Image: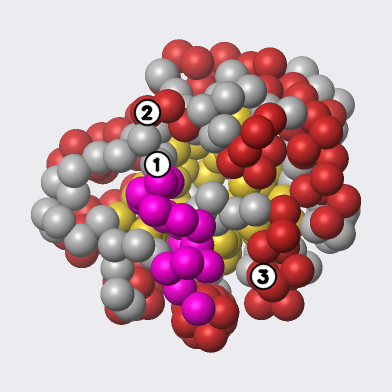
Amino acid sequence: MTRLLASVASLEELTLAARGGADILDLKDPKAGALGAWPQDAIAHAVDTARRWSVRAPLSATVGDLPMDPAPVTRRVAETWACGVEYVKIGLSPPGDPVGCVEALAPEARRGTRIVAVLFADLWTDPGTLLPDIAKAGFAGAMLDTAGKGSGGLLRHKTKDELARFLAQARGYRLLTGLAGSLRLDDIPALLPLAPDYLGFRTALCAGADRGGALDPAALAAVRNAVPRQPLNG
């Protein structure tokens, strides 16, 4: 069953999203790019805050929109994982050496770092071509997102058939799967039948669909109602 990932930009939003029933809490700074990162000390503070809750959803954290240079990518992933989150998300883009970055992260994955590759539907003609390398490196998951948030949502860049093919490939490699990318409330009925493990939201959770604005509890409730809720251990 599909779960709800909510991207949050602050500790206040972290608490609001948790209370609103998000299944995974994604630490991301929407004003700093597609995968803008929180500062390391803020990530650690968020982890400490969440650990005080009696029941909580897993936390993921992005590492920023990094150039595809294996050494700094590996270092940032390791630093972010050390903050105590359950997943670290790294965006893979065509320029540079994305395959080299994936290979360089394999030792981190073997040490237990749960890495999720984020592939950008508006940058990759066929993002599935990287899935064999991602699986071989021991990543925990792979998801599709969009890099250019002003160029339309996920369904503008990939058809439902293309999304279904990507998800089937990823499942074949036993990867956790996710779809995101300026998703709207009315995208949910089209995407739920594809059965990704997660649907990720930011824009649809904010007042006026302004991804750089504040999380709106009413908007979160509408999305939460549209994505059938599952037990965290279900």
Where 61 sits versus 111, above or below? above
Q: Residue at x 41, y 19 (%)?
A: 39
Q: Residue furthest front?
A: 208
Asked if labels 2 and 3 touch by Cβ distance under 8 angstroms, the answer is: no
* Disc 3 target residue: 191
Helix, strand or loop at mark 2: helix
Point out residue 107 in the picture as x, y percentages from the top left corner: 30, 53
- Sequence-wise, the earlier of marks 3 and 2 is 2
Of residue 141 and residue 33, the one placed in the foreground of this image is 33
Q: Quadrant of the C terminus?
A: bottom right
Q: Residue at x 50, y 62 (%)?
A: 154
Helix, strand or loop at mark 1: loop
Point out residue 115 in the picture as x, y percentages from the top left corner: 44, 51
Asked if labels 3 and 1 touch by Cβ distance under 8 angstroms, the answer is: no
Q: Which residues are magenta?
A: 135-159
In the rendered structure, find residue 34 and report the number of the disc placed on it: 1
